[in-house]
Image (cartoon, helix red, strand yellow):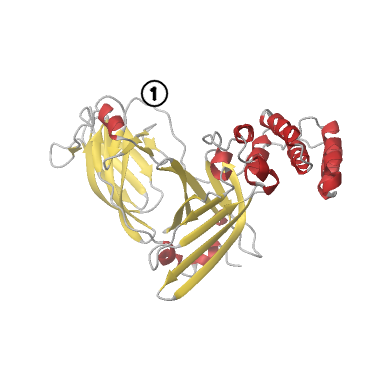
């Protein structure tokens, strides 16, 4: 089976490459802190703390009415002797110099980009010199693109650092909740019984652990199988009211389990499992449509990507490229975990110990009225997948 390291060796750059892009800076808000990229992307400048900024700008698509309320001012290009700011780049490090009240050339902020910076294209200042933006080039998925980053030069005492959405952090080291051996033994036994005995077996689990989410889920399925729809709905409602952290996992599972197909059009069921509401947790954002995501492929340009995450924290990715009659089919298999609002993938190389090099971060970003999931497997290697509704 091919893993991430194998793919790096077979020119996945060409397979995953998409169209190049060039962002343009639209100016800073005259009534608030945000800035505008292109015509419809509103971004928050990165706060500067002790001369440094971290992470990536947070941006959202915005309608014309929202942009109008921000009173965007034309950008002030920093050139010549009257410029307040200048910027230089070395590797992934961007340095902004200048001065508001001291001598020119003072280092104001340093920032690390995700990918190596090619060159600084332009520097822009706000009308009050309290914010500065830099347009720079970088290579992404094999092509040169222009990105925009802006910094808030306000007082450090009010500036709040933002997390880096692409940085991979290790799993928490907190002790896992203690599992009652008797409950686990009863649940393991209940998973093995025949359908006719499932109801009684899972009720024994509830006798030991009255709030067990899996037991409520399995009992509801057994009740529905015996044509007791009202009882099944009542059990699902109990599951929906649970405060257990894993209750949402079983509610999401019920959305697409064939065992609950007979209830899928029932308003009470849909409300209980959350089929018609917006995702409230990162888990729901990833798994809300069954954990199935996809990127549409185009011949010789963009790879087809099928991304499947399952409740047991397994992820399978298939990358298919087609060009001039030739097809390349690359499978991945690994695990996933949540890290805040990010999804961290671990794609190990068979026979080798897992290292940081086997981990990759995926972040959510807006795509119209839904989420897209952008995954970066390394320099110039990435894809953007959308939910595959069943």
The local crowd at label 1, few if under 14, some if 14 to 19, many if 20 or more residues have their Cα within 10 Å, is few
Residue 19, x across and y down, in percent: 34, 58
Q: Which of the 4 image quarters holds residue 241?
A: top right
Describe residue 358's horizontal placement relative to residue 49 as left or right: right
Q: Circle 1 sits in a helix, a strand or a loop, which is it?
A: loop
Residue 169 seen by the camera = no
Q: How many marks?
A: 1
In the image, 234 versus 113, the foreground residue is 234
Residue 185, x across and y down, in percent: 85, 43
Describe residue 26's horizontal placement relative to residue 258 as left or right: left
Residue 234 seen by the camera = yes
In the image, 20 versus 10, the foreground residue is 20
Residue under the point 31% across and 28% down: 33
Describe residue 370's horizontal placement relative to residue 86 as left or right: right
Residue under the point 32% across and 27% down: 154
Residue 364, x across and y down, in percent: 47, 43
Residue farthest to the left, as pictured: 81
Residue named by callout 1: 158
Above or below residue 322? Residue 34 is above
Residue 209, x across and y down, in percent: 81, 32
Above or below residue 220? Residue 383 is below
Residue farthest to the front, as pictured: 227
Q: Which of the 4 image quarters holds residue 112?
A: top left
Q: Which of the 4 image quarters holds residue 156?
A: top left
Question: Could you tell me which quadrant the N terminus lies in?
Answer: bottom right
Residue under the point 55% across and 44% down: 286
Above or below residue 140? Residue 372 is above
In the image, 174 versus 18, the foreground residue is 18
């Amino acid at each position: 089976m091919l893993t991430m390291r194998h793919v790096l060796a077979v020119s996945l750059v060409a397979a995953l490459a998409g169209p190049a892009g060039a962002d343009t800076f639209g100016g800073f808000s005259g009534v608030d802190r945000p800035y505008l990229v292109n015509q419809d992307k509103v971004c928050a400048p990165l706060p500067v703390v002790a001369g440094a900024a971290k992470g990536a700008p947070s941006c959202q698509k915005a309608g014309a009415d929202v942009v109008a309320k921000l009173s965007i001012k034309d950008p002030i290009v920093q050139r010549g002797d009257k410029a307040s700011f200048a910027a230089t780049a070395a590797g992934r490090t961007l340095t902004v110099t200048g001065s508001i009240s001291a001598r020119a050339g003072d280092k104001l902020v340093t920032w690390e980009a995700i990918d190596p910076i090619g060159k600084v294209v332009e520097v822009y200042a706000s009308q009050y010199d309290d914010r500065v933006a830099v347009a720079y080039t970088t290579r992404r998925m094999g092509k040169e693109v222009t990105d925009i980053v802006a910094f808030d030069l306000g007082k450090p005492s009010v500036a709040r650092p933002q997390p880096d959405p692409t940085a991979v952090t290790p799993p928490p080291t907190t002790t896992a909740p203690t599992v009652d051996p008797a409950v686990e033994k009863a649940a393991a036994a209940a998973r093995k019984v025949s359908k006719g005995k499932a109801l009684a077996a899972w009720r024994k689990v509830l006798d030991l652990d009255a709030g067990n989410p899996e037991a409520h889920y399995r009992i509801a399925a057994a009740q529905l199988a015996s044509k007791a729809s009202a009882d099944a709905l009542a059990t699902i409602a109990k599951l929906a009211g649970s405060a257990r952290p894993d209750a949402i996992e079983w509610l999401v599972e019920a959305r697409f389990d064939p065992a609950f197909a007979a209830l899928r059009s029932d308003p009470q069921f849909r409300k209980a499992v959350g089929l018609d509401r917006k995702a409230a947790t990162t888990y729901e954002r990833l798994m809300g449509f069954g954990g199935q995501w996809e990127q549409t492929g185009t011949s010789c340009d963009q790879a087809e990507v099928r991304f499947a995450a399952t409740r047991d924290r397994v992820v399978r990715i298939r990358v298919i490229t087609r060009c001039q009659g030739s097809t390349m089919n690359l499978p991945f298999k690994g695990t996933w975990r949540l890290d805040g609002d990010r999804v961290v993938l671990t794609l190990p190389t068979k026979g080798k110990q897992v290292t940081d090099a086997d981990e990759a971060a995926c972040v959510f970003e807006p795509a119209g009225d839904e989420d897209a999931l952008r995954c970066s497997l390394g320099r110039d290697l990435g894809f953007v997948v959308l939910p595959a509704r069943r």
